Amino acid sequence: MNVPFYGHVRQYHNIKAEIDSKISEVLESGQYVLGPMLKKFEGELKDYFGSKYAIGVGNGTDAIWLVLMALGVGPGDEVITHPNTFFATAEAAWIAGAKVVFVDCDPLTKCIDPSKIEAAITKKTKAIIPVHLYGQCADMPAIRKIADKHKLFVIEDNAQAIDAKGDTFKQGELSDAVATSFIIQKNLGCFGDGGAVFTNNPQIDGIVRKLRSHGSLKRDHHSFGFNSRLDDIQAGVLSAKLKHITKWSDQRIQHAARLDKGLKGVKNLTLPYAKPGYRHVFHLYVVETKDPSRRDECLKFLNDNGVDAKTHYSIAIHKQEGFPWNKEYSIVGSVANAERNAASCISLPMFPELTNDEIDCTIEKVLEWDSKA
Ligand SMILES: *Cc1c(COP(=O)(O)O)cnc(C)c1O
């Protein structure tokens, strides 16, 4: 049996009629950019998310730097994040012109370790970007406390964590804005590129809305801006999918529980850590080899045996080839946890449409490697 890593086409087939009808509604409307479907979807999105505003933008990377720019964060400023995330988190800060300052991640959740943040704060620090990595919220109350004390902005990168919640908090409550991505491999994915900004701040909403479309809200009236819009066909696809997101997250959570149970006795791997009380939506189900030097061998064994496991992310950002080009960055303290995560992580197949047989096949192959390891 082969266990695929993604279920995009299965998902499309399951709700084909709903998606096709939204797409044809847009095609028939003749309005494909900043049209009525985008407006409708933005309304649905903010209601679902519980924020005052939702702005559709071109992709998740743009969502982050458009917010930074709206907040006036740019050249001469510093932005704190952690290096074991998707490259775009740091890239967005560089696009805005800021310097990236990396601190370590928490050894259990792999999200930013709030206890490492204060040592990295200087007079130039303007913002913290916590990433809700793998589908689990970062420790937002601790981050908020530090941000309040030092008057910093907080932008949540929730590209991997739509529908996730903290124990005592919701996304967007303890930050200035939340940036998300709708590229297909995310938990809410369209059929191309897409992203959104959520905020309760009318100034951020107003500026991002202008910046995304040539600095313009009105024909022939422009200020400085860009072109980063969520088009109406993608908005239609997302509008159809949004109705299913809670169910899909629940399915991911069930699959994670089945994997946890089946893999409970493994000796050579650490299983993902879900914080008590948090809704971890398992964008990714990431195990780690206890011995980082055996990761590649384990990954190869799974791949050779039909389990399409991958790595997220096998090279920390500051270790990427060619880094740092001309981009400014610094590392404060040790980032050993982040580097260990990069060296030892393996993402097992995880998507809502997985069957129990496929999950059991993954378990069987992992146990087979573990018993030989
Ligand atoms: C996917 C992702 C992004 C970027 O999203 P794009 O839509 O590809 O630009 C940013 N941050 C994280 C953590 C991501 O996983």
Image (cartoon, rainbow, N blue to C red):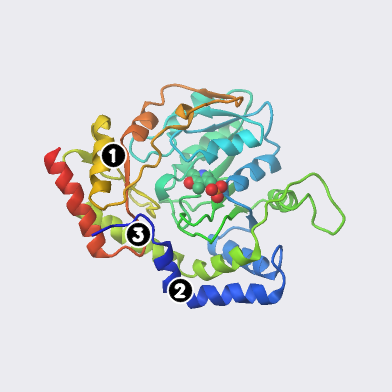
- Toward the viewer: 60 or 161? 60
Residue 272 screen position, x and y as percent? 30, 45
| Residue 359 visible in rendering | yes
Return the residue at label 1: 288
* Quarter that holds the N terminus: bottom left
Q: Give the farthest residue toward the left.
A: 371
Front residue of 243 and 148: 243
Disc 3 residue crowd, few under 14, some 14–19, many 20+, Cα 10 Å: many
| Residue located at (44% from left, 54% from top) | 165
| Amino acid under disc 2 | Ile
Q: Upstream in the sequence, badge 1 or badge 2?
A: 2
> Residue placed at 26% from the left, 56% from the top?
257
* Quadrant of res 261: bottom left
Question: SS class of the residue under badge 1?
Answer: strand
According to the image, label 3 marks what residue? 252
Viewer-side residue, 193 vs 223? 193
Query: Secondary structure beneath disc 3?
Result: helix
Q: Which mark is residue 86?
A: none
Mark 2 and mark 3 in contact? Answer it, CB < 8 Å: no
Contact check, label 1 and label 3, Cβ < 8 Å: no
Is 297 left, or right, of 175 in this rendering?
A: left
Q: Residues within 10 Å of mark 2 (few under 14, many from 20)?
A: few
Q: Residue at x 60, y 65 (%)?
A: 235
Spatial CA distance of label 1 from label 2 is 34 Å
Task: Tell me the amino acid under the disc marked 1.
Answer: Glu
Mark 1, residues whose alpha carbon is within 10 Å: few (<14), some, or many (≥20)?
Answer: many
Say what amino acid the circle numbered 3 marks: Arg
On the image, the x and y values in percent for residue 108 come to 33, 38
Q: Mark 2 against mark 3, which lies toward the viewer?
A: 2
Locate the C terminus by quadrant: top left
Q: Which residue is mark 2?
A: 15
Instruction: Where is residue 195? Give x, y as percent.
Output: 58, 54
